[in-house]
Image (tube, coloured by chain):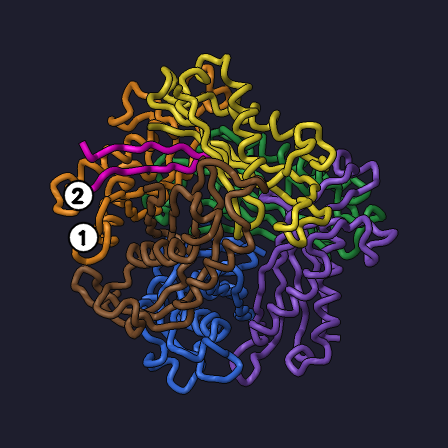
Chain colours: A green, B blue, C orange, D purple, E yellow, F brown
Amino acid sequence: MFSLTIRRHFMIAHSLPREVFGPAQALHGATFVAEVTFRRRALNEDAIVLDIGAAGGIVEGVLAGLNYTNLDEHPDFAGKLSTTEALAEYIARAVAGQIKDDADGRELAGLDVTVRENPDAWASYSLDLSA
Amino acid sequence: MFSLTIRRHFMIAHSLPREVFGPAQALHGATFVAEVTFRRRALNEDAIVLDIGAAGGIVEGVLAGLNYTNLDEHPDFAGKLSTTEALAEYIARAVAGQIKDDADGRELAGLDVTVRENPDAWASYSLDLSA
Amino acid sequence: MFSLTIRRHFMIAHSLPREVFGPAQALHGATFVAEVTFRRRALNEDAIVLDIGAAGGIVEGVLAGLNYTNLDEHPDFAGKLSTTEALAEYIARAVAGQIKDDADGRELAGLDVTVRENPDAWASYSLDLSA
Amino acid sequence: MFSLTIRRHFMIAHSLPREVFGPAQALHGATFVAEVTFRRRALNEDAIVLDIGAAGGIVEGVLAGLNYTNLDEHPDFAGKLSTTEALAEYIARAVAGQIKDDADGRELAGLDVTVRENPDAWASYSLDLSA
Amino acid sequence: MFSLTIRRHFMIAHSLPREVFGPAQALHGATFVAEVTFRRRALNEDAIVLDIGAAGGIVEGVLAGLNYTNLDEHPDFAGKLSTTEALAEYIARAVAGQIKDDADGRELAGLDVTVRENPDAWASYSLDLSA
Amino acid sequence: MFSLTIRRHFMIAHSLPREVFGPAQALHGATFVAEVTFRRRALNEDAIVLDIGAAGGIVEGVLAGLNYTNLDEHPDFAGKLSTTEALAEYIARAVAGQIKDDADGRELAGLDVTVRENPDAWASYSLDLSA
């Protein structure tokens, strides 16, 4: 199995209005560093998983929809909690949607998204695309 | 699959009295940076793998039993080698023991523990909790 | 010259309502990683710059006043821009205020505060305490 | 499952003469940081995956064949593209060849090689050795 | 004193044809991570050292002239050694040239450029602009 | 001003038998990552601060005298506290002693040594060699 990972970041405001989140129930924010991994069983004829420029563009496009926003008012998170785990899944599904019609995208076995919220904590989501 | 990772560190003295360890047979020490990953197939109703505060508290509690000790005299390592690999397994099993009676803990699919001993070497242990 | 550096982080929401800040004029947020460096010409009789536990406590106390807040509503930033540079100065002056009556604190030559806003950008402020 | 990871780096020149690579079609170069992970179901009698010194020596030996070379003229890449993905596979197979006759090497379940080309992009290859 | 630092990277081929460079006399390459620090005694009226977007654009413009090139054939290094130290000075002087006619640029006390060639080695150059 | 920095690590056991050190009064240990910076006003005729191989060898030689030891029994620390700050000064003075008779060494303006004890704390010592 091969993989290619692209790292980018985005900066948002949000609140997590459930008792379990303690002080994070207040409006605060985060720099989220996202690492998006594209997995594939065999390389394409250019000996790559995916064109790194195209992959970077897709990731940047998805993150641009979040960057410099207040997730409490973001339509995609209406009625939902924007936890680090939920953001990892959101990014994975959005990236998958962008690449599913691409020749290399159809060959992907899966996507892994890690979202780092601070130096001491991060969350990940793995999406199986082989079915 | 989702995961949440908590990073903490601890500082210990130890020796590794087998010929294969060369100069590490002498009493020396290490700053071990532990990354404890909690894996779960679906998020709980708060859209998280586990309460990050509770998870951090459990990891800190386990590492507190090691921090600022000489592992050569630590009862849990009597007659055992405290290699980086063995420490990863020890931490994983201790964390698993702490969470097994917790509602979210029962939903975990597994734990991964990575223990970094210096910038150029680290070891990991994966514990399956799905059985 | 000796120095001791303590690293901690805090997570905030804010906006930067000036045209030069482009998309950062909107309410967003950041994980700020603060590195506070205490400088001293000679070590104390315990061969340290400052007690690392006390220093960590002071830094944590200062950052606790910012963590999980919306700086747009924080009294210390009323009518002020909470840029990364401004936060570095704010933290340095607050830490200096906390240590000025301490025996070791009086011996400090200066403080440097670096505040990292994302992996690709950070700001610093150096405060001379020797006068 | 246990693993041990060794990190080393190497510096090479190369070109990627396919249209998809854009400006990387020109002769340029990279510092590649390689993380080689050795996976094993159970530890050996010394409570390790592999002797860290021996593992480091094997990785260094493989990378020494690449370090300070122009991969465009390297016999192992004649007629092949030296993409980051291809380098990850090359290193994994070369390391596997070196350890296959070793007592601990025969116990390995697999190898994972991650090759980082810059702070924002890296590729990996996983080699199953359990068959 | 305040400072703002921008980090970017570039990938080049080159050789260092002097005996002291040993194996680096051969054509090889590097990923150079450049950290450009802008120093200023007081902030501007927007509470910043420099517009971070403008500063990033200037650094990217300078590095674009180096990225994906073979420095052995680069006109700016004709007859010169492209050591890490020399690259740090080159970048500092090129950035200084770009900002000297800018209102904020004229207020700068200096520039520091750190160029990282691998995880274990880096070089820096400090340029005084206060004269 | 130019500088070259070399990073290496060493692993030791020690105790800090003063009340101020709290739990670190017990025998424990650390992985210390040392960053040794060599400063020089002008480059030599090879456009470098110092031969990076020679500089690395000197740093490794100094750290080899500490690596895998118990500093409580190390003759150079008899009757002294082996704090991170004290180690930074020790390494700086030992490196300075090694290079003072070297042609490039005589041109150095100073040495800076940073010793990182864990991801959240480090100490530095600057040695002026220009006098």
Question: What's the residue type where badge 1 is placed?
Answer: Asn
Residue F117 appears in the picture as rendered:
no
Q: Which residue is mark 2?
A: C107
Does C130 appear in magenta? yes
Quarter that holds the C terminus of chain D = bottom right
Magenta stretch: dominant SS?
strand
Do callouts 2 and 1 mark residues in contact (Cβ within 8 Å)?
A: yes
A77 in relation to B46, above or below: above
x%, y% of residue D38?
62, 69
x%, y% of residue F11?
41, 66
Q: Nearer the viewer, residue D73 or A98?
A: D73
Does C47 appear in magenta? no
Q: Nearer the viewer, residue B95 or B33?
A: B33
Secondary element under disc 2, as helix, strand or loop, is loop
Residue E20 appears in the picture as rendered:
yes
The answer to whether residue C102 is left or right of residue B102 is left
x%, y% of residue F93?
34, 55
Q: Chain of mark 1?
A: C
Q: Residue at x 47, y 41 (%)?
A: F3
Q: Which residue is mark 1?
A: C44
Q: Chain of mark 2?
A: C
Q: Which circle's residue, 2 or 1, is located before the other in the chain?
A: 1
Kindly give the residue lying farthest to the right in the view shown. D79
Stretch in magenta: C108-131
Q: CA distance from mark 2 to mark 1?
A: 9 Å
Question: What's the residue type where badge 2 is placed?
Answer: Glu
Mark 1, other Cα within 10 Å: few <14 / some 14–19 / many ≥20: some
Q: Residue at x 62, y 55 (%)?
A: D9
x%, y% of residue D35?
61, 59
